[in-house]
């Protein structure tokens, strides 16, 4: 970015047509910025997308193609069989995201970043991924196809609604104040996770309210998944 800025200032001061070398430098720098932008997207939104995709349409897909009848014949009930598979998926998701984020944390440490801050970033990515995986599994456990897509739309809509509620103009409305008190229990808790991991910083008190709210969301979606599996257990095949 500093090189691009220097070349741009030189082109403005000269006031003439840019040379071939300057054009090549600008093109190379723009390509590098695009690459860094894609990497930033992978370390940010890509990790959430990965977590949503991990459970896939496990229950809904197997119910639709009839494979669920193989598991229904086992002594273990479906409401116990699928959570065991889901637990393995959660462990794999957590480990993959931890390794992915630790790679970025180790790369950032030489720049002088505090280890506690980097640890908070690792915990934030892992918590977001675990919750995203839980939401996607809960949707497929309800027998709904394309669970990852629906969960992703829920995640994006939560971000939009959360941004609207933080708007200072809307913040003065009574309805917005009421919604701000209720919606944190319904929307994806991105802000809640940020408040939770802020406690890893020095001199910052631990936010137990955010911790409880994050735990509530995980329990909520786990409970929804269990209820969905209990309903499907009564009629495994969708007629």
Image (spheres, rainbow, N blue to C red):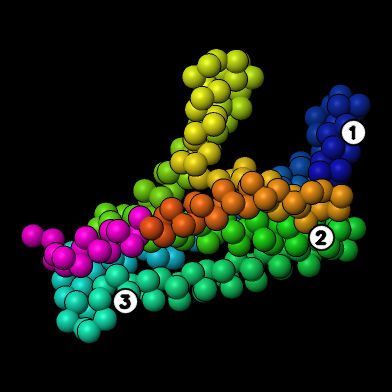
**36 sits left or right of 126 in the view:** right
Q: Mark 3 highlights which residue?
A: 81
Q: Can you give x and y, in whole percent of width and height, for residue 69 in the image?
A: 16, 75
Which residue occupies the extreme left position in the image? 239
Q: Mark 2 highlights which residue?
A: 116
* CA separation in Å, label 2 and label 3: 39 Å
Which residue occupies 33% across, 62% down?
A: 226
Q: Can you give x and y, in whole percent of width and height, for residue 65 in the image?
A: 17, 68
**25 sits left or right of 189 in the view:** right
* CA separation in Å, label 2 and label 1: 41 Å
Please rate how many residues cluster around mark 2, counting C-alpha atoms within 10 Å: few if below 14, some from 14 to 19, many from 20.
some
Residues rendered magenta in the picture: 224-239
Nearer-N-terminus badge (3/1): 1
Discs 2, 3 touching: Cβ within 8 Å = no
Comparing 139 with 30, the one in front is: 139
Image quarter hosting the N terminus: top right
Residue 30's disc number: none
Look at discs 2 and 3 and give the one toward the viewer. Answer: 3
Q: Mark 1 highlights which residue?
A: 10
């Amino acid at each position: 970015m500093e090189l691009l800025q220097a070349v741009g200032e030189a082109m403005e001061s000269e006031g003439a047509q840019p040379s071939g070398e300057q054009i090549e430098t600008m093109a190379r720098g723009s390509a590098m910025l695009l690459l860094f932008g894609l990497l930033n997207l992978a370390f940010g939104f890509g990790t959430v997308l990965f977590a949503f995709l991990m459970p896939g349409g496990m229950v809904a897909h197997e119910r639709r193609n009839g494979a669920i009848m193989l598991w229904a014949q086992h002594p273990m009930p479906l409401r116990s069989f699928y959570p065991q598979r889901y637990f393995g998926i959660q462990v794999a998701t957590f480990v993959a995201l931890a390794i992915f984020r630790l790679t970025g944390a180790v790369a950032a440490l030489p720049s002088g970043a505090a280890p506690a801050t980097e640890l908070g970033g690792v915990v934030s990515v892992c918590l977001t991924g675990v919750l995203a995986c839980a939401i996607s599994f809960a949707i497929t456990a309800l027998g709904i196809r394309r669970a990852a897509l629906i969960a992703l739309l829920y995640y994006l809509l939560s971000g939009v609604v959360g941004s609207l509620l933080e708007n200072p103009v809307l913040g003065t409305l009574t309805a917005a104040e009421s919604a701000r008190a209720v919606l944190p229990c319904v929307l994806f808790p991105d802000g809640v996770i940020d408040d939770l991991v802020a406690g890893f910083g020095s001199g910052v008190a631990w936010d137990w309210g955010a911790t409880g709210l994050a735990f509530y969301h995980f329990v909520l979606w786990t409970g929804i998944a269990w209820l969905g599996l209990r309903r499907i257990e009564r009629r495994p095949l969708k007629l």
